[in-house]
Amino acid sequence: MQAHFTRRELSTILAALRFYQEQGQCQPAHRSQWMLDIASNLGQVRPLDGQEIDWLCDKLNVSREDAP
């Protein structure tokens, strides 16, 4: 399944990911329980670490070039 986002939506997603990093939420010791629930899909997946967030942002930036 491929999601399509507008430039505004992608910009907001990127800002949220960078805020997540900035607030230390990539580090389990600093992650609030509700954020862990979201990032792990209620324990079904391992949350992304800081480097994986960087890779995701890079991936989304490439997608943003194609967004309307």
Image (spheres, rainbow, N blue to C red):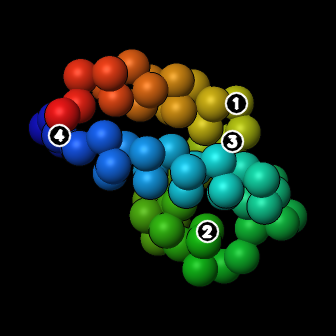
Q: Are marks 1 and 3 in contact (CB under 8 Å)?
A: yes
Above or below residue 32? Residue 43 is above
Distance in Å between CA atoms under marks 4 and 3: 24 Å
Badge 2: residue crowd in 10 Å (few <14, some 14–19, many ≥20): some
Residue type, numbered disc 4: His
Indicate which disc, 2 or 1, sits on the residue closer to the N terminus. Answer: 2
Badge 4: residue crowd in 10 Å (few <14, some 14–19, many ≥20): few
Secondary-structure class at tag 4: loop
Residue type, numbered disc 1: Gln
Q: Position of residue 67 (x, y in %)?
A: 23, 31
Q: Residue visible at 41% across and 31% down?
A: 60
Indicate which disc, 2 or 4, sits on the residue closer to the N terminus. Answer: 4
Indicate which disc, 2 or 3, sits on the residue closer to the N terminus. Answer: 2
Residue 36: mark in rendering: 2
Q: Residue visible at 53% across and 32% down?
A: 57
Distance in Å between CA atoms under marks 2 and 1: 17 Å
Residue 68: mark in rendering: none
Query: Which residue bears the numbered disc 4?
Result: 4
Secondary-structure class at tag 3: loop
